[in-house]
Amino acid sequence: MGGHSPCASCKLLRRRCAKDCIFAPYFPSDDPHKFAIVHKVFGASNISKMLQELPVCQRADAVSSLVYEASARVRDPVYGCVGAISYLQNQVSQLQTQLAVAQAEIMCFQMQQDSAVMQLPRMMDVPDDDRSSSPFLLPNNLTHFLNLSPASSGNVTHDHPLKRESILGHDVVS
């Protein structure tokens, strides 16, 4: 052993840790769980082969990826990290939909406010006598579409100009 403690890999596999052990730089003895989970999913031989095929500068990133994938495989043996990615993509999609709905609602409220602000000068220009029949009180001349004109046979009763029937049949004075 020559004065250094064996890496997590050599401890788990109960073998002598050589100075040139490929696992030692990436699986320190103080973090045995890291190698145990990677070994359980990929096997020590496969990990060794993968690391040997990579340049030394890429090995740390590869080990990090192997640990992440192994952890995901333990949680979800079928899909691994792809399952986690799909779940997060679905969440993002749902949140984007909710955001779009909220933005549309805000836009509608802003349009209603803008329309109401635009109608204020028109209401002030109309004499008080004509306000009850003025088409300018509702934005974009909506009185026609809401059947609120006195000539319509909708909910307006003709016996009293301010009396209307509600949906329940009760008289409402407005």
Image: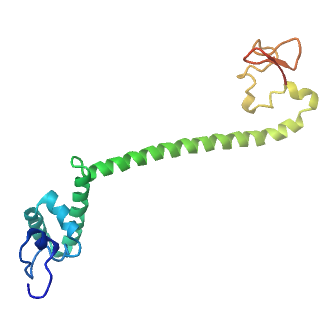
**Foreground residue, 146 or 172?**
172
Up-down relation of residue 156 to residue 36 (above or below) = above
Across and down, in percent, residue 28 comes to: 20, 75
Across and down, in percent, residue 114 comes to: 72, 43
**Foreground residue, 139 or 104?**
104
The N terminus lies in quadrant: bottom left
Q: Which residue sits at x=20%, y=62%? A: 66
**Foreground residue, 137 or 169?**
169
Horizontal side of residue 141 vs 75, given as left or right = right
Question: How many marks on residues?
Answer: 0
Q: Which residue sits at x=51%, y=43%? A: 98
Horizontal side of residue 85 vs 127, given as left or right = left
Horizontal side of residue 136 vs 14, given as left or right = right
Q: In which image quadrant can residue 115 be found?
A: top right
Across and down, in percent, residue 104 comes to: 58, 41
Q: Which residue sits at x=70%, y=22%? A: 145
The C terminus lies in quadrant: top right
Across and down, in percent, residue 26 comes to: 19, 73
Residue situated furthest bottom in the rendering? 3
Horizontal side of residue 103 vs 5, given as left or right = right
Q: How is the image coloured?
A: rainbow
Q: In which image quadrant can residue 49 be found?
A: bottom left
Q: In which image quadrant can residue 122 be found?
A: top right
Up-down relation of residue 135 to residue 113 (above or below) = above
